[in-house]
Image (spheres, rainbow, N blue to C red):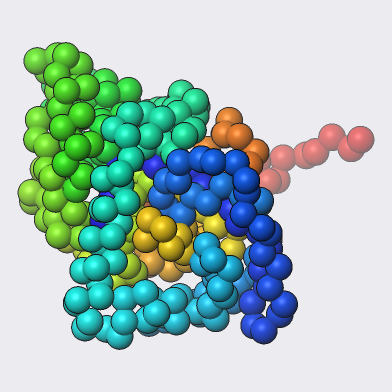
Amino acid sequence: MSFSLHSPFVSIGHFHCHNHQNHISPPSTTTTTLASPPYLFQQRRKTRSVLTLSSESMEICGVDSEGKEFNSAQEMWREEIGEEGDETRKTQWYRDGVSYWEGVEASVDGVLGGYGHVNDADIIGSEVFLKTLLQERLVNVGANQHLVALDCGSGIGRITKNLLIRYFNEVDLLEPVAQFLDAARENLASAGSETHKATNFFCVPLQEFTPAAGRYDVIWVQWCIGHLTDNDFVSFFNRAKGCLKPGGFFIVKENLAKNGFVLDKEDHSITRSDPYFKQLFRQCGLHLYRTKDQKGLPQELFAVKMYALTVDTPPKIHRTRSKTTSNRPQIIK
């Protein structure tokens, strides 16, 4: 299972659910390094999905990178990892994901699937989002507050080096691909300062990791959660909720399928749609605090969205006019 930094996903053609004819575009003849969640560099697709907002099931149709359609996410997961409780097949799913990334160069271009040039736009978009959240959620920033972040799927330390280490006193990195984590140690050796530094390097898969209780102000999850099954997705966030400090929050930044999902058969990951993500967030007991679309990426790439998630319920803002204002004589135009 890989939690490296991944390139935005270029979608795979056209499909329709519920027994409509499949229209999958032929593979691109351009050779490009694949990255995950499913980054199949072909034509943008149009999809239709059916979402059942049940707390127990999601009937979301999807397609895999070979053009096979699925009537639901459950059907896809049964095919990929077997029935619930089949730990052998699920273990193989994660092992194959790690194996894929072990064959990728430990560089910005490598972990971004040949799209290293999107690095600057990605970091700029993330920084704008993060600064707003820090100002709103952690009001004492700058007043001797010691801030700590966890970089999930840290890869070679790209996000930590270019963003997190400038805002947090300590950053822990989590990455299951050893060669990426070795590169991160090297890349971060001279980065930061005594008061802003990378502290811990965990070579552990996300589905097996339990963060230290109450350690983190921000847990950053980018271009990696697509490698987790739905059950492990929910389990990770349920474990991690207790690891946030008061006022702390998650940032999830991921590619979006236009609707439904797309399964990448090569690197063993899934790109989910916005409704799919939101249903899983609800199952985790997380509250959607703020979202933002990433701008400035090439048109052929999948949309990328940032989610800020909290354990506490965001306060509701009631916008009502005062009696003085509502009764004030108006100018007739």
Residue 93 picture location, percent across and down = 29, 66
- Quarter location, residue 267: bottom left
- Quarter location, residue 282: bottom left
Residue plotted at (49% across, 33% down): 115
Residue 35 picture location, percent across and down = 42, 46
Residue 94 picture location, percent across and down = 25, 62
For this view, does 296 lie left or right of residue 272? Answer: right
Considering only vertical position in the picture, is 104 above or below 270? above
Question: Tag count in the figure?
Answer: 0
| Residue 77 visible to the viewer | yes
Residue plotted at (26% across, 53% down): 99
Of 210 and 307, the residue lying toward us: 210
Residue plotted at (21% across, 83% down): 85
Considering only vertical position in the picture, is 294 above or below 204? above
In what quadrant of the picture does the C terminus appear? Answer: top right
For this view, does 3 lie left or right of residue 278? Answer: left
For this view, does 78 lie left or right of residue 264? Answer: left
- Quarter location, residue 246: top left
Considering only vertical position in the picture, is 94 above or below 169? below
In what quadrant of the picture does the N terminus appear? Answer: bottom left
Residue plotted at (41% across, 30% down): 109
Of 288 and 280, the residue lying toward us: 280
| Residue 249 visible to the viewer | no
Residue at the farthest right position: 333
Residue 244 picture location, percent across and down = 18, 48
